Amino acid sequence: MRTNQQTTLRAPTTLSGIGVHSGNPAEITIHPAPANHGIAFLRTGMPTGNDRFIKAHHACVSATELCTVIGDVATGAVATVEHLMSALYGLGIDNALIEIDGPEMPILDGSALPFVRAIDAVGVGACGAPRRWIKVIRPVRIEVGRAFAELRPIDRGFRLDVEIDFESPVIGRSRKAMDLTPASYRREIAGARTFGMMKDVERYWKAGFALGASLENTVAVGETAVVNPEGLRFADEFVRHKLLDAVGDLALAGLPIQGAYRSYCGGHRMNVGVLTALFSDRANYAVIEAQGGRRESALAEFGVGLGIAAFAGDL
């Protein structure tokens, strides 16, 4: 398969489980989609009986507290989209329709690995149309307190550099940088699980979060050690998962990015915020195509005015 061609799944694939925050069951089917469709969600099972079509786009983000939510809660939304979005981006999939019958994606084992395995089982094929990218032209940066996130131009590819710095001695400070390819994503990122502090559990429950969290889908961090009996999958699993989340959130650009991403103490809010900064000025980026490298209209491609992102804290 040529990498300059848009891609999709060769056949539908279905997964089911519970939401890590809601605790509610959900089933998803990832359907193949035609060229230039992009990634979108079809929310079914609504009380009104009306299905809701939601583009996987940063302008459709409605919340970023502990997870990334797209769509409007009152009329139909999907929460915790970042792990599936990460898998799709990591495997280089441009077009897919995700049908989901509940308000939150299933957390599965807390990583993107189950999604990767499901996609690999049906295979990825070309759509017969040129691939397009967002090329970062000018650096953009956002800062919130000591945290920052930035996108910078590079000659080719997509490079990520993520650093975390937690007070917890179990997590501490670590940094990971990598060039994103399907091979590197499968090997280094897909299996890294979400994590949370045991001391914060009661506060999360009172706020309506982490109702479906367990040792089967979350790395639980105690005061002096990881609680999970199997331990960590990687010595630096915490920063790898933050990188996994960054890939998923940055997939909400709507097209793959040609650029370099760097963050320190970031999270969903910062990941989505740097996309808002990038698209705030047409001079910051160009849309390029594999054949001919021509620019295209930003207004046509990204649906300016679809919505406003609401930001809150991060896990």
Image: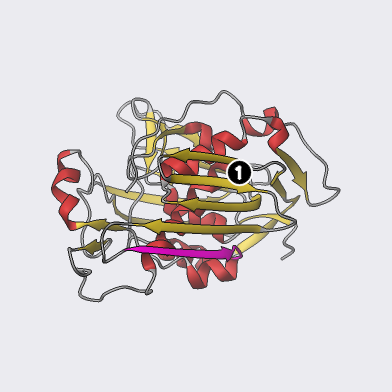
Residue 129, percent from left and from top: 75, 50
Residue 295 in which image quadrant: top right
Where is residue 145 drawn, in percent x and y? 40, 40
**Position of residue 21 in the picture relative to residue 99 (left or right):** left
Determine which residue is flagged by label 1: 38
Residue at the image point whose x is 55% and y is 60% from the top: 90
Give, as a three-letter code, the residue at label 1. Gly
| Rendered location of residue 70, percent (x, y) | 43, 36
Q: Residue at x 58, y 42 (%)?
A: 253
Farthest residue, direction top: 305
Q: In this rendering, would 270 be left or right of 26?
A: right
Q: Identify which residue, 235 or 288, lies in the foreground.
A: 235
- Residue 201 vertical placement versus 184 (above, below): above
Disc 1 secondary structure class:
loop
Image coords of residue 200 (percent x, y): 18, 50
- How crowded pointer 1 is (Cα within 10 Å; few <14, some 14-19, many 20+) is rated as many
Residue 33 in view in this figure? no
The prevailing secondary structure element of the residues shown in magenta is: strand
The outermost residue toward the right is 292
Q: How is the image coloured?
A: secondary structure
Counting every numbered tag in the picture gives 1
Asked whether residue 5 is in view, the answer is: yes
Residue sitting at x 39%, y 33% = 311
**Of 186 and 286, the residue lying toward us:** 286
Say which residue appears at 42% left-offset and 40% top-offset. Answer: 269
The N terminus - image quarter: bottom right
Span highlighted in magenta in the image:
172-181
Camera-nearest residue between 43 and 144? 144
